[in-house]
Image (cartoon, helix red, strand yellow):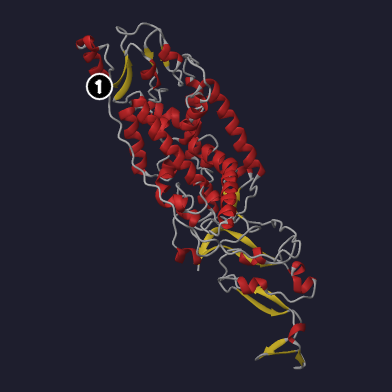
Amino acid sequence: MLKKIRITLALIFWVLITWLLVDFTGTAHVYLGWMAKIQFLPALVAMNIGALLFIVALTLLFGRIYCSIICPLGVMQDVIAWFRKKKNKYSYSEEKGILRYSILAITGFLLATNLAWIVGLIAPYSTYGRIVGTVFSPLYKLANNALAALAEHYGSYAFYEVDVWLKSIPALIAAVAAWIIIGILAWRGGRTWCNTICPVGSLLGILAKYSRLKVVIDPDICNGCRKCERNCKASCINGKTHEIDYSRCVTCGDCLEQCAQHAISFGYKPMIEKQNQIAKEYEDKKADESRRAVLTGVALLAGTALVKAQEKTTDGGLAEIEDMKKPNRDKLITPPGSISLRNLSEHCTSCQLCVNSCPNDVLRPSNSLDRFMQPEVSYERGYCRPECTRCSDVCPTGAIKPITVEQRTATQVGHAVWIKDNCVPVADGIPCGNCARHCPAQAIQMVPLQAGVHQDGWRWLDADNQEIPRERVLLIPVVNEEKCIGCGACENLCPSRPFSAIYVEGHEVHREI
């Protein structure tokens, strides 16, 4: 029963947290946002005391059950190992203590020096988030688009199509590399990554040595078949000496199922030893009913909601539009709620949850080495709508703090800058005004390009007060930096290509209007 309960809970957690990471509608976060917040590293970075105490208490009671049920990367390794249909495929190995605790010490140093993004490169939840968000999220969106097309064919608009695009080649390479390395280690050695590299596994392993409930081998009953050792994916059971390395045991229950002699029990160790001495006559029964600790299941209710299709601006399909290129910004733009570039860098673990949740396609992983795969804002494919707070809603670490719509509309993440030579009225002599028409903050005013031209009511007059036909008056934008919130609507909707005639420079520290 222990193994069945563990597998059931693990699959529920794994499927739902994967859905949370790939969902682009915001539906999953309403019900499952807490799953990201109880992951160890996000809870530690956010100083979520409640989640940390829960994980510590769980470990001191059941051992490293967190690694077998709650950690999605751990469950993924179990799934990969399960596909290797081979019996007795493992063997006991000595603990790589120097490597494990050296990585743990380095991790502690990096966290103390506010370099959480480096820790995120090997932390289990962040690593899994990047694998899912970069590799599998596009596949999920493609499946959604196929379903949307099928539904539309039958007159239903319950689903809507979304753009599928490559946000970062370095992030894709890093995610695929991590997936391949961890997959090979899981295929060959089960929990090798967890018990050698993972700093969370090493830290919880220290606590697991003192757990209340443990897997215990009774040497008086054991016949020395060593099936438990050969089927232990953590390689922590020494069948010769009947010893178990509890710092590596993930309480999966596989050994309990393999023992035909019922010599292995899970429970309070002193009590089990006493019961084994008193109740030898019950050895032939299916043991563990009187000694097994009952794991409490978690009931989850996942709901789905219909979502409305977002409005899109198109050219009608009549002209071939050149793709917009990213401008060279002096300062990066960080998401609303991140407060500053420093706060984002110190708290973000690069799990990609905000990137995959962004409905406006303005977030993408950074390629910069000093903040690799942390989110940054750019407006080639959309703009940051003032009414949207999705990234701040889903962030589990506090790198992007929760904000309201009112706070969002009063937060200046940057300001618009006009490039005269790129502007359509200047370069082509054609009226435009797209930036001013679409500015949600009304921070852009159009003024005449020609010197001396001014407005009198509905008329335009030149320097000699002679009326000028409206179509001959060319207007250029002037930005009011006190009102501009840096949403990027002007940059995104500017028709100038390949570089926009107006772009947003980020603020290193966000300002409030």
Q: Is residue 327 above or below residue 77?
A: below
Q: Splitting the image into 4 quarters, where does residue 465 fall?
A: bottom right
In the image, 167: left or right of 340?
right
Q: Is residue 135 above or below residue 260?
A: below
Q: Is residue 244 above or below residue 312?
A: above
Residue toward you, 341 or 313: 313
Counting from the top left corner in percent of width and height, residue 501 is at 71, 66
The amino acid on which the numbered mark 1 sits, given as a three-letter code, is: Arg
Image quadrant holding the N terminus, namely top left
Secondary element type, mark 1: loop
Counting from the top left corner in percent of width and height, residue 129 is at 52, 41
Residue drawn at the location 58% of the way across and 25% of the way down: 184
Counting from the top left corner in percent of width and height, residue 425 is at 76, 74
Q: Which residue is mark 1?
A: 291
Residue drawn at the location 41% of the way across and 44% of the way down: 37
Look at the image and tell me whether residue 115 can be seen.
no
In the image, 215: left or right of 159?
left
